Image (cartoon, grey):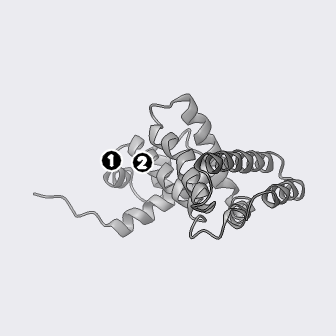
Amino acid sequence: MAGRPVNHARRAEMLDAVVDYSVENGFNDLSWRPVAAALGVSPTSLVHRFGSKEQMLQEILGRLRERIFAVIGPTEGLRADVGAVWERVSDPRRGGEFRLFFAVYGYALQAPEQFSDFLDHVVNDWMNSLRDAQGPDTDPATATRTATLVIATIRGLLLDLLATGDHRRVDAAAEAFVATLPP
């Protein structure tokens, strides 16, 4: 006898709820019972939907990555793209997502085998988009250096913002940085 077919819409909805829970509560103590209670489902339902806690964590990271990179779309040019990214990531309503992102990043560096997929994508996804935003006429080595500088600078500014909450100072620094980028 075959099991129930997977309801993909419900699964996606549940995944978003689990991600929201993780944004609010972190992932260090992520376990079936508290997550299930917060979502109003049984722990068995979560196991049915995700398989294992490790699989659930991987899916949380994948969805978090999708949310973070959702702003990167059709390119308007490097300066405009990076400005749009900064506007999105520095939005105070997104602070929880990025606190979770940096917590996972730090944890992944400590346990690279467990988080290899996350580490494979954490730079490469954005790197490719930033290289593309520089246009086909940009020397590939120059495009890679510029993309690396953008990633490091935006992440550093975001860490500063999350640590201090000083929007005026950090936004001014971000604006100054973005102004230095080629259109």
Where residue 152 sits: x, y (%)? 70, 44
Q: Distance between the residues labelled 2 and 1?
A: 7 Å
Q: Looking at the figure, which quarter contains the C terminus?
A: bottom right
Can you see residue 9?
A: yes
Q: In this view, does 47 lie to the left or right of 20?
A: left
Q: In this view, does 147 lie to the left or right of 91?
A: left
Label 2 secondary element: helix
Residue placed most toward the observer, 163 or 33: 163
Where residue 74 sits: x, y (%)? 57, 70
Where residue 114 sits: x, y (%)? 45, 34
Q: In this view, does 89 lie to the left or right of 132?
A: right
Pointer 2 and pointer 1: residues touching (CB < 8 Å)?
yes
Decide: is 25 above or below 80: above
Q: Is residue 2 left or right of residue 183?
A: left
Q: Looking at the figure, which quarter contains the N terminus?
A: bottom left
Q: Where does label 2 land, which residue?
A: 56
Mark nearer the N terminus (2 vs 1): 1
Label 1 secondary element: loop
Q: Residue visible at 34% across and 55% down?
A: 49
Q: Which mark is residue 92?
A: none
Where residue 169 sits: x, y (%)? 89, 54
Residue placed most toward the observer, 150 or 20: 150
Residue kind at label 1, given as amino acid type: Gly
Q: Where does label 1 land, which residue?
A: 51
